[in-house]
Image (cartoon, rainbow, N blue to C red):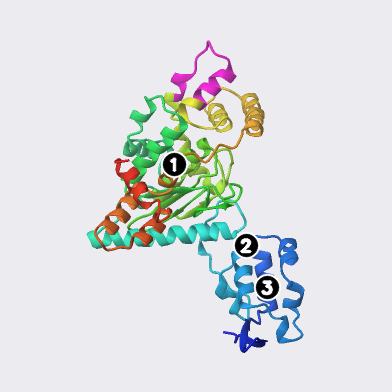
Amino acid sequence: MLNLGKIKRKGVGSVMTTLRVPVSRKVIQWAIANGEKSEDELRRKYRLDVWEAPKTDHDFPTFKQVQNFSRDTRIPFNYFFKSEVPEEKNTFVKFRTINNVAVQPSRRLIDTIHAMESRQAWMKEYLLGQDGQARFELSQSINEDMRVGAVAQNISKLLNLSDIFTQSLGDDDFFNDLRAKISKLGIMVMQNGIVGTNTHRSLNVDEFRAFVLIDEVIPLIFINGADSKKAKIFSLVHELVHTLLGRSEVLNASLEDDVASERWINQVTVNILMPEEKLRLEIKDSRSAEDNLKHVSRKFHTSLVATAIRLRSIGIYDQKLVDWAQDEQQRYLKQKKKSSGGDFYNTALSRVDRRFANAVINRESSGNMAIATAASMLGVTLKTYDATVDKLLGTA
């Protein structure tokens, strides 16, 4: 730990002390490289050249400046008191689907995973407090030596998906029904498109679509809410398969990507979302290939490209339809307008697992948790906590 430099300033009738921090040049440069703001932005705002090569104690940043620099870069404040570059052991990085594990994850991904780990740990303690023998019984219930079709059928039965496929649901309702079924299996399902409640820190779909944190009591699936509706459905099922395998993952692929290590899992996911026998029943000769594709995509809540690839794989159509789907999907994405935030309470409740929310409310209502803590865990303010609880319990 470095000592703080103290520089006295004379005021009228008193002596004030300004605390300055001799921050290591290495740490400053590491923070610039791994923080959220660009180097240009930071150098315009702070005297970084002076901080990096101080000639006197006056050149050290003040305590307040270090606080602001920490906030801007999203680098933990205590890192700036280290003499060497901090070594972050982000073990989850090795679970990424595609990206090179040497690539530094963003502060937004790091902060999101840490927040979910904290909630997972709390929920685990809560469940073990109710039942010391509580365990997630489905962990490692499948393995990659099993036949894809058989595994997909078993998971579909486990989720009772036959009743969903008979309904005419929009993508949102389908996702919510699927999420509720997965939660009932004993898996926390969280989602968010931003870090916590900070609307200025949106999550990047290009970096990750979802992740799963394996635990012997309460595994957790997190869905990047910034993704498209159909992509979120794929990610949810894909991460369910990972959970049943008992393997943590940070997913940054889609159903349309062919990743060797994910091929078996993607095949299972495809067979769950688009079972061949049901798919074939939806194809009508009276419709064009393009119209059949659009119909099936809506029916099974999968993207045009993923659906076209599936139809090609079972021999109904060829690559020509996949090419058309890619062009059509790109055109749609360019035209798509960003939707509004929607109802505050619905958005807040959509971010947390329902079982987790009920557990937090139960702990708070029993007097064993401060309301401020409960509100923070649910991602709402103290002012909106009661209304959020009423909405959750159906009394609003």
Q: Quadrant of the N terminus?
A: bottom right
Residue 169 seen anywhere in this rendered image of the structure: yes
Q: Mark 3 belongs to which amino acid?
A: Ile
**Circle 1 is placed at which residue position?**
237
Does 299 appear above or below 230?
above
In this rendering, position of residue 15 left or right of residue 47: left
Query: Mark 2 or mark 3, which is nearer to you?
Result: 3
Percent from the top left, x then y, of residue 43?
A: 74, 66
In this rendering, position of residue 320 left or right of residue 136: right
How far apart in space, not on screen, are marks 2 and 3 (Cα)?
21 Å
**Circle 2 is placed at which residue position?**
102
Determine the secondary structure under disc 2: loop
In this rendering, position of residue 122 left or right of residue 322: left
Magenta stretch encompasses residue 194:
no
Range covered by the magenta-colored residues: 279-297
Determine the secondary structure under disc 1: helix
* Label 1: how many Cα within 10 Å (few below 14, some 14–19, many 20+): many
Determine the secondary structure under disc 3: helix
* Label 2: how many Cα within 10 Å (few below 14, some 14–19, many 20+): few
**Circle 3 is placed at which residue position?**
28
Q: In which quarter of the image is the C terminus?
A: top left
Does 202 appear above or below 36?
above
In this rendering, position of residue 348 left or right of residue 251: left
